[in-house]
Image: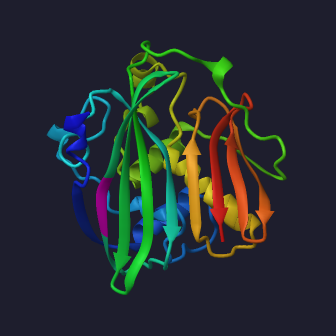
Amino acid sequence: MKKLDNWIGNQISQQEIIHQHALNGFSAIMDEEGPASDIVPPGGHWMYFLPTERQSRIGPDGHPITGDFLPPVDLPRRMWAGGRLEFHAPLHAGDTAEKISTIKSVTQKQGRTGALVFVTVEHRVMNETGLCLTEEHDIVYREAAGQTSGGKKDMQLAPSDGIWEETITPDPVLLFRYSALTFNGHRIHYDLDYCLKEEGYPGLVVHGPLLGTLLMRLATSKMEGRPLRKFSFRNFNPIFDTASFTLDGKPEHADKCNVWVRGPAGELAVMATADF
């Protein structure tokens, strides 16, 4: 852990022009009618500042090899554990934007599924006029499949008191298009053979940020389209392309709601809070 602690404070910055093409792709994946907006929607920032590691620097799971910006965690399975976002000002197509990313913490834990390492990365996105978005992104590294314990008997059930409900049926084309839009090479989202044999999953894994984006869209639509100020989410269980899942939620008061993803067995997949 002392070696991994040396990565705390590590920082990189990227600059990019916000192009309309990515917003058009986002609108298509979300099955929206009409021309796409020129405003980056909640979750749309994940289409920009994408990793561009050389092919020779890609690991066996499809992710860039760690040890440059991210610490060299010696655990093979990587997942998006959750995050916290705060929206300060809109990003528009045509803006020249910068993202500054900083390693905030590296924490080792022992969970019911074995050894875990959590890495939290802070992202700050700004344009010519100032700060647009801050994000804390939680990454979890886990042991290889077959070395873990626990199972469905341990799964937490999703809340049953939601008043909003939307069914989503994932498929390999949706997951591939989202991977392409975000330049995400992680093989768990498109390589079924790898999922089954290497990761021990029953199907392709639906992206954590895609689930977060869907929940932000649900919250915004149910809260009368008001601007989203804060959004925090935590991933509890993976969602696969083998069955439909449900987006659900309820208002807490005029400026806040809870939304979540319920898996096909009633399990809690993602829990989130949205502030307006």
| 94 sits to left or right of 269 | left
**109 to 132, vertically: above or below:** above
Q: Nearer the viewer, residue 263 or 89?
A: 89
Q: Is residue 160 left or right of residue 208?
A: right
Q: How many marks?
A: 0
Q: Report the colour scheme.
A: rainbow
Residue 49 is at least partly visible in this image: yes
Residue 144 position, x and y percent, is: 38, 20
Q: Which residues are magenta?
A: 99-103
Position in image of residue 163 (x %, y %) = 84, 53
Q: Is residue 27 magenta?
A: no
Quadrant of image for the N terminus: top left
Q: Looking at the image, is 141 positioned above or below residue 255? A: above
Name the one closer to the observer, 65 or 82.
82
Image quadrant where one finds the C terminus = bottom right
**Magenta span: helix, strand or loop, mainly?**
strand
Q: Where 65 sits versus 183, above or below?
A: above
Pick out the residue farthest to the bottom. 129
Q: Residue sitting at 65 percent across and 22 percent down?
A: 154
The answer to whether one can see residue 71 in this image is no
Residue at image point 56% right, 33% down: 238
Q: Quadrant of residue 156?
A: top right
Is 94 on the left or on the right of 151, as rendered? left
Give the image location of residue 3, x and y in percent: 19, 36
Q: Which residue is at the front of the view, 250 or 52?
A: 250
Q: Position of residue 183 (x, y in %)?
A: 35, 51
**Which residue is at a point 54% across and 65% down the rendered structure image?**
42
Name the residue nearer the viewer: 142 or 204: 142
Q: Quadrant of residue 147?
A: top left
Position of residue 133 relative to residue 114, above or below, is: below
